Image (tube, helix red, strand yellow):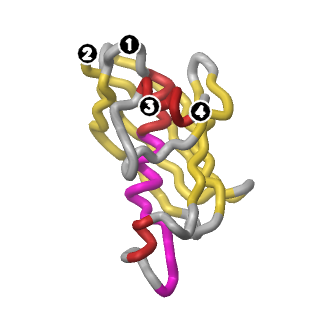
């Protein structure tokens, strides 16, 4: 799935659209990527002399990947909660950030997912996320 196809599903737009492409998608999982480039405006302020991609952006990217897994039609993903978020390593430019999201449980319009982010084979973030789906 390309960025153009992603924008047909998610309501997000640059600079807060944090998924560049979907690599693989199954019924209960998705693998997506974001290119982390030094020219990203966030690096002008976080931190100019030692650029680190913000953890909150990693979590938001994971939530957007979950939205791509879950959404159909004119639904809107609502980010409802974060549990057990852990940041295992820094994410620095220039790299590919890979999101891996797996459906854990669904209760009506509330969905729980296990979410992990990697750079290469290195786990950089893991969390459990709760999302809602609004029509």
Identified at 25% across, 20% down, the residue is 134
- As measured in the structure, the alpha-carbon distance from the residue carrying label 1 to the one carrying label 3 is 13 Å
- What residue would you read off at disc 2? 135
Q: Secondary structure at mark 2?
A: loop
2 vs 4, front mark: 4
**Mark 1 or mark 2, earlier in chain:** 1
134 or 103, which lies in front? 134
Q: Nearer the viewer, mark 1 or mark 4?
A: 4
Mark positioned earlier in the residue sequence (2 or 4) = 4
Task: Return the residue at label 1.
Answer: 73
Q: Label 3 crowding class (10 Å Cα cut-off): few <14, some 14-19, many 20+?
A: some
Upstream in the sequence, badge 1 or badge 4? Answer: 4
Say if 43 sits above or below 65 in the image: below
**In the foreground, 55 or 113:** 55
- Disc 3 target residue: 7
Q: Which residue is mark 4?
A: 2
Does residue 131 belong to the magenta stretch? no
Q: Are marks 1 and 2 in contact (CB under 8 Å)?
A: yes
Neighbour tally class for label 1: few under 14, some 14-19, many 20 plus, Cα within 10 Å: few
Q: Percent from the top left, x then y, of residue 97?
A: 60, 53
Task: Report crowding for label 4: few under 14, some 14 to 19, many 20 or more residues within 10 A (C-alpha).
Answer: few
| Label 3 residue SS | helix
The alpha-carbon separation of the residues under discs 1 and 2 comes to 8 Å
* Name of the residue lying farthest toward the bottom: 49
């Amino acid at each position: 799935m390309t960025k153009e196809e992603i924008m047909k599903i998610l309501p997000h737009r640059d600079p807060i659209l944090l998924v560049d492409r979907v690599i693989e998608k199954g019924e209960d999982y998705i693998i997506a990527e974001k290119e982390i480039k030094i020219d990203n405006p966030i690096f002008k302020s976080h931190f100019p002399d030692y650029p680190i991609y913000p953890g909150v952006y990693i979590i938001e990217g994971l939530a957007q990947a979950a939205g791509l897994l879950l959404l159909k039609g004119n639904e809107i993903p609502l980010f409802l909660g974060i549990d057990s978020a852990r940041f295992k390593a820094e994410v620095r430019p220039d790299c590919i950030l890979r999101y891996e999201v797996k459906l854990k449980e669904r209760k009506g319009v509330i969905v729980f997912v296990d979410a992990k982010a990697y750079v290469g084979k290195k786990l950089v973030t893991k969390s459990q996320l709760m999302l809602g789906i609004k029509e």
